[in-house]
Image: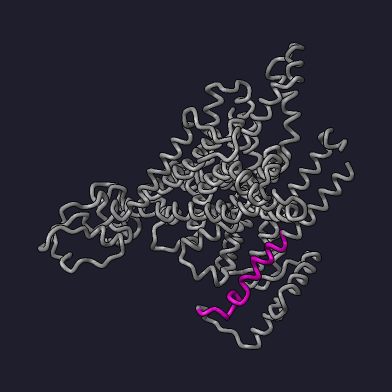
Amino acid sequence: MRSPTPGCAVPRRGHLPRGLVAGGALIGILAFFGIAAPFVATDRPLLARGPDGWSSPAARSAFGLPDAPAGRSATAVVMAPIPRAPETIQLDSVLAPPGPGHWLGTDGLGRDVGSRLVHGARVSLAVGFLSAALALLVGLPLGALAGWSRGPIDAAVSRGVEAMLCFPSLLLALALLASSPPWLSALPDSVRLALVLGITGWTPAARYVRAEFLKLGGSALVDSARASGAGSLRIAVRHVLPHAAAPVLVTASFSVGSAILLEASLSFLGLGVRPPTPTWGGLLTEAAAHLERGWWLALLPGAALFLSVLGCNLAGEGLRDRLDPRSRP
Amino acid sequence: MVRAIARRLATGAVTLLLVTAIVFALAAMSTGSSLPGESVEDTSPLTPEQRAEIRALYHFDEPLHVRYGMWLQDLLRGDLGRSFHDRRPVAAKIAERLPATLALNAAALLLMILVSVPLGALAASSPGSLLDRAAGSATYALYSIPVFWAALLLQLAFAIRLGWLPLYGTQTSGMEAAPLVARLHDRLAHFVLPTVCLAYPGFAYLSRFVRGILVDNAAAESARAARARGLAPSAVVIRHGFRQAAVPLLTLAGFLLPRLVGGSVIVETIFAIPGLGHLFVGAMFQRDIPVVMGLTLLSGAATLGGVVAADLLYAVADPRVRRA
């Protein structure tokens, strides 16, 4: 990134903070599983050999294509590491403990827990990142406007943020879902959740951006830009906004973590993504129903959630240390 | 100081009005789709007369701003409206569920303080030491554990495997006739796991907060003077550090309250505790909008009250603010 003003650029030298590396690696691994889920856990062969040559039924289904006409007569050559689909019900192997057939056991309907866990990463991470992006989309302009204009607009935005912060974020999301306005209930589950979490979660971004604009508004940085003839909008976007990038990145990574947690809470309460789509929160609801006979159901979905939230928080702290030397202990 | 207090109260009032506006907007979006008998899946359709009666009861035929005004007037009289579900006053429904939630939250807050303050003080006594870093990492990891996962694991370990504590509920059935001590013991046992679940996410920020203040104060002039007078390090922490920590701790109210309320929703659902969180989730599934509104408003207003009260106490307690 080219720095528009000298002296306050993002520091480049030095090692990356350990938290940032560890957090980034955690999120990276989980995101890999989420993205590659149709190839990691599927009952279709990754590679099959039929009468008219090689094919990949898994790839066809991952990209939404119908099975090849010769697909049925093809013989599987390479199967996925978890050769089960997440929604296949097998009533002859209900609540099977982890073992050779099912590495992580099966749930109350005989579905493969490993496969559901891998596919669950998709919803969790997609909702987490999408809602954080939406929160930024709302919070950044509002915060910038408030901090830059000061006066009555600032007072209005600040009171609004203060009012929003009075509500626990889970309660606000639940209330919005409960009222389920028609424009909201028409959306697909994960988009709806991301939207709800974005609408209810923009306040931290707005607060930090406002503080940054307020701090820099009267500084020599702005005066010098104005002296050289730059217009107000240009100063705000080209000179002040880049400085707000650091706090924004930090809040964004924390808000991905809290959105993942909130999505899981909503799904756990039965108000998130509806079954049979596997989500980590939903897997834990099933675990609660079979707690006495299926301990393995509770273990890994929660661990996956824990690691992704921990990853986001570590990355956020690491970013903060990296971008803002003052916060170093 | 009077001017500062008056200003804080005025901005607090504006925020309170915004809080009510947010709650009303949330509810207003749902109108029409939520009226009993008007949804497709309702199996007992109402007669047109009954429907008109309900529409009149909830003022559904008035324009939005009129309804908002009427709702605010009712609020001023302490009337939160009537439940869609059983037509009982929302305030009465909340009142009968409040004690369980208050007891749970008070116990959680107490546990949070009992664990975090000593932990923070211990960590602050040797900043940068192995103990300090271990405490920091452990509470940090705890903070990232989803509460419903922790609840399941604790239930699995202490209720199912070890059998030491009850799985859920607030009392064992058939204990009504038992002697008082046994009944009390039974009640308390039911509250152990929920309290732990509600409290543990707070260990991280509360203990780090206490540590931060104590470390700052230890570096301050007054602490150095105290050490120079020959006070033991522990005495410096206790007699000087904590006194100064008390004021900033007040500001935590605004941070802690919403989290406790949000946590109550999940904890009460998992452990089947008949409190406000339980009521909220039930009302959500029944689309009982007046109850959802009442509880959302209550939590928002309570948090705002906590924040404003903390700010006012801060103004009274801090001589620098007091003079302004």
The residue range painted magenta reads B19-40
Horizontal and vertical percent position of residue B215:
66, 25
- In the image, farthest residue toward the front: A228
Horizontal and vertical percent position of residue B159:
47, 45
Report the side of A220 relative to B269 (left or right). Answer: right
Horizontal and vertical percent position of residue B241:
72, 25
What residue do we see at 52% from left, 40% from top? A2
- Residue A110 painted magenta: no
Q: Quadrant of the C terminus of chain B?
A: top right
What residue do we see at 84% from left, 38% from top? B316
Q: Which of A38 and B122 is in front in this view?
A: A38
In this view, B135 is above or below B193: above
**Circle count:** 0
Q: Nearer the viewer, residue A94 or A47?
A: A47
- In the image, farthest residue toward the bottom: B48
Residue A294 visible (yes or no) = no
Horizontal and vertical percent position of residue A223:
71, 41
Q: Which of B183 and B101 is in front in this view?
A: B101
Q: According to the image, what is the colour scheme of the structure?
A: one colour
- In the image, farthest residue toward the left: A51
- Residue B35 painted magenta: yes
Q: In which quarter of the image is the N terminus of chain B?
A: top right
Report the side of A150 relative to A250 (left or right). Answer: right
Residue B55 visible (yes or no) = yes
